[in-house]
Amino acid sequence: MINLSILKPTALLFFLSAILTAKSQNITTPRTLSPAAGVSQTIGISTISVNYSRPSVNNRAIWGALVPYGWNVQAFGTGNLAPWRAGANENTEITFSHPVMIEGKSVPAGSYGLFFVINRDNTGEVILSKDSKSWGNFFYDPANDQLRANIILRDIPNTNLLTYEFTNLTKNSCNLVLNWEKKQFPVKIEFAVDEIVMANAEDELKGAIGFNAQSYTSAVNYALQNKVHLQDALSWADKAISINNNFTSQSSKAAVLTALGRSTEADKIMTDALPTANEVQINAYGYQLLTAENTDKAIDIFILNTVKYPKSANAWDSLGEAYFTKNDKKNAIASFKKALSLNPNANVKANSEKFLEQLGAK
């Protein structure tokens, strides 16, 4: 037991204040109504996240009743006409890691309060507010709007618990949809993925990974695969060569030169680099040529591999595929049979047998 009489006046006041403060604060307990939830989605290297609270229908009339149609004056707060809070409790908050297009309109990276308007005819609006931390829509101020865009609502089967999800995913885009009761609110979200990846690569290559040739080669490969920033890719290929002049870095530069229409330069680089290549690298280069529909050159490369590695079943199997692509049945059959004679592993054996069956020579 504490004897309060021995405490100095200032200490007594502090002690009593601490007791009263402790008694006035509640412990953290679960929300039994409208529990908190969150969803996220990655598009390219960009992320979208939504944090919200999930009310239930609970046999209530929702549209035009619990959620009024149009814009409405709130009983508390700013007194402004306000949209629906798109959930319950605090603001529904949406966060974008990179600049984004929402329903065709540009929005900077950042966190926003997410609001909707619903009209009787299934038209509506999506609204992003730069005020993402207020409670619900009571303090909504149109001066803070970052975006307003029209949307068309859809009729769906009944959804009791308000739910956000991502649909229609592509390389660059998705739809964020809110489903509740028998209505769906779809919002189109798009990122300039290739531009974001390339800008991020440029930043990353200024850091620790920029001392590694493989980092530059990976940036080159992305640019090649997506046919973007080829001049940057050529600079990155040169940087990889300056760090580690090997077949991988040389072949990356040759691939960029080919994509830029500078085939003569590319061929010279590959001719000089091939003597340093191992079996796997030569094989990969052959398939690269096949993909580019340079079949005759691919056959030359696969033949080189069988000369350097005559006991490799995989080298002969790959040569067979090249002859098959050229419709040279005789040499394709001979190559596949040679591969099978060299005790191939299960994958190579299955591949050779598959082609021989197609050629009617099994």
Image (spheres, rainbow, N blue to C red):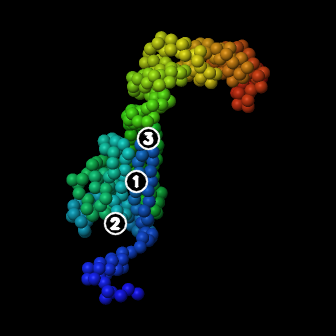
The residue under label 3 is: 45
Which numbered marker is on residue 65? 2
Q: Say what amino acid the circle numbered 3 marks.
A: Ile
Q: Position of residue 294 (x, y in %)?
A: 55, 16
- Label 3 or label 1, whichever lies nearer to me, is 3
Residue at the spot of label 1: 50
**Is label 2 in a helix, a strand or a loop?**
loop
Contact flag, marks 3 and 2 (Cβ < 8 Å): no
Measured as percent of width and height from the top left, residue 159 is found at: 46, 60
Q: Quadrant of the C terminus?
A: top right
Where does residue 327 sit, x and y in percent of width and height? 65, 15
**Residue 68 visible, this angle:** no
Is label 1 in a helix, a strand or a loop?
A: strand
Q: In terms of sequence position, does the residue under pointer 3 or pointer 1 come before the other?
A: 3
Count of numbered marks: 3
Q: Mark 2 or mark 1: name the one nearer the start of the chain.
A: 1
The front one of 178 and 154 is: 178
Residue 189 placement (x, y as % from top left): 38, 44
Label 2 vs label 1, nearer the camera:
1
Circle 3 sits in a helix, a strand or a loop, which is it?
loop
